[in-house]
Every structure is written in C-alpha cells, then in structure tokens.
Image: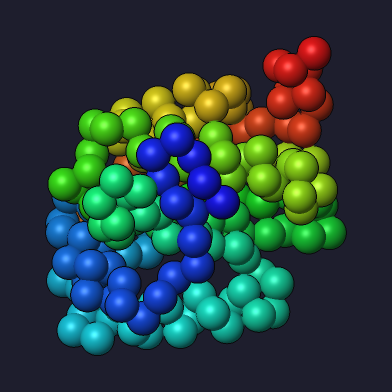
Amino acid sequence: METERLLLRKLKMQDATKIEEYAGDYQVAKTTLSIPHPYPKGGGISFIQAVERSQKYGKLVLFALEEKSSGQFVGVINLNFIKPHRRAELAYWIGTPFWGKGYGTEAAKKVVEYGFNELNLNKIHAMAFLNNPGSWRIMEKIGMQREGLLRQHIVRFNEVHDVLYYGILRQDLQEEFE
C-alpha cells in the first residue's frame, strides 16, 4: 500500500538493523508496552520472525513504513486482531529521526481504511500513555474518539502511567465520507 510519502510493505530481513537501532532508542521504547530496553542484539531478526509467524496464523497484519523519497525504513504499524468481535488494536512506532513529520498520522489513516475496507473490521481501537501526546494526537487526527482514561493502569520501566483509549467504528468512517 502507499500513501503520499510512504510505502507500507512487508518487513524484510534487511530491516532488522534499523529495527534494532530505532526500537532500541529509549525514547521509542518508553512509549510502548513491549519493546525491551536495552534492545537485544539480534532482536530485529527475532522480531521479524515472530511477526511472520503471527501473520501466518492470522493474528495480526504488520507493515514496515518506508519513506518513498529516500527508501529509508521509518517504523512499523500493525493491527492485532480480535476476530470474534471483528475488531483490531492499532499499534505503531516511528524511529526518532522521523518524529514530527506526520508519518504516523499518514500511515494510521491508511491502515484504518484498510482495516475497514479490506479486512471487514467493525471497530479499530488504540491506546497511548497520557504523557505521550504525539501518539494520542495521531488517533484524534484520524478520527478516533476518546473512549476513556484508565488511571495508573500500566507500569513501564518502574513508572506508573495513565492510559488513554481511543476507538473508531466502521460507521464513523462511512459517515465522514457521506
């Protein structure tokens, strides 16, 4: 898939080095639930292999984000399926050299449209730490509605975090284009 400035493609083994570099940055890791810090050597390859297995079993769809103008790997975006309920959780991270360029918003909008139009989802939801406005502002920009605040819900790197939950329904997207 493509957006104006990004190619959303399958991960390649060549991405492993950049995955380790970008995900290994504490500024990226601290905004996620599961990226370890320090990031282990060889973890990029293990991550790609785990993604391939999960995709094979229909648990998720994940796209590498590539800047079209330079061919550089930027980050990842994915949908984790909850199939019985026709919903998925949207998750993403962007390497710090690409922060503030709107790539997260551009990719998230495209993946939400894909989730509804190609995967027949009814709802897509996402979460972000309250102290990570860069992430939850992406959710707002693509039309997700704030559904709640869970206070002191997550402990990450020995810090307690409030979590914001957002969601968008298929009908919300349809109403936007009517």
Q: Quadrant of residue 53?
A: bottom right
Left or right, 168 with reference to 16: right
Residue 126, horizontal then vertical, whole percent:
54, 42
Left or right, 8 with reference to 94: right
Which is nearer the eye, 61 or 29? 61
Left or right, 15 with reference to 126: left
Residue 78, horizontal then vertical, whole percent:
53, 56
Residue at image position (78%, 60%) is 83
Which is nearer the eye, 61 or 134? 61
Depicted 44 relative to depicted 22: above or below: below
Depicted 77 relative to depicted 46: above or below: above
Left or right, 61 with reference to 30: right
Q: Is residue 29 visible?
A: no
Residue at image position (71%, 16%) is 176
Q: Is residue 16 visible?
A: yes
Residue at image position (48%, 54%) is 8
Residue at image position (76%, 50%) is 118
